[in-house]
Image (tube, rainbow, N blue to C red):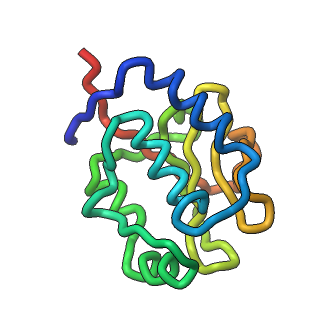
Amino acid sequence: MPTLEHIENWDRWLVEFARAADGQAFEWGRTDCASLVRRGLQTIFGKDVWKGHVGTWKTRRGALGVSGRTDYVDALLASGAVEVGFHFAWSGDVALASREDEHGMFSTGLLVPTRKVLTSTPREGVVLLDKLQLEPGTKFYRYGVNDG
């Protein structure tokens, strides 16, 4: 598995990112759940770990197009993540729902140091949920890190 390095004080930066995002309105390509996770991972690692594995979009139509062409489990694994069990999921891990949402896409979230999950929905916008509120069957993925 390829390893990445967290930026210095990544956990603090991730908390600040989550606090700033919490409550924002839903916007395709910025605060939809996958774009939010992508930006959170950039906050942690200082680069886009999904580049070349998960496309980007600015509209619902664009998101549906990327989603239709992307197997998210394969994309997570190809970008260096490994699956971890529910009880082992911690800050910086990606949550992936087991079924599609009302838009035909899989909901994603990013675990933050407060034991919450940063995610979003068109109806609620950006929210911080308790990990226990995630639907049964949600899978968690961790990027290998080498922090010295």
Compared to residue 48, the image places residue 88 above or below, namely above
* Residue sticking out furthest to the left: 2
Q: Position of residue 30 (x, y in %)?
A: 55, 59
Q: Position of residue 43 (x, y in %)?
A: 44, 37
* Residue toward you, 54 or 89: 54
Q: Position of residue 34 (x, y in %)?
A: 52, 59
- What residue is at 40 percent from the left and 68 percent from the top? 56
* Residue toward you, 5 or 1: 5
Specify whether 22 is left or right of 15: right
Specify whether 61 is left or right of 71: right
- What residue is at 28 percent from the left and 47 percent from the top? 80
- What residue is at 25 percent from the left and 63 percent from the top? 52
Q: Residue 71 lies in what quarter of the image? A: bottom left
Q: Quadrant of the C terminus?
A: top left
Q: How many marks?
A: 0
* Residue toward you, 36 or 83: 36
- What residue is at 48 percent from the left and 39 percent from the top? 93
Specify whether 18 is left or right of 55: right
* Residue sticking out furthest to the right: 124
Compared to residue 78, the image places residue 127 above or below, namely above
Q: Position of residue 95 (x, y in %)?
A: 55, 49
Compared to residue 124, the image places residue 87 above or below, namely above
Q: Quadrant of the N terminus?
A: top left
Q: Residue 70 lies in what quarter of the image? A: bottom left
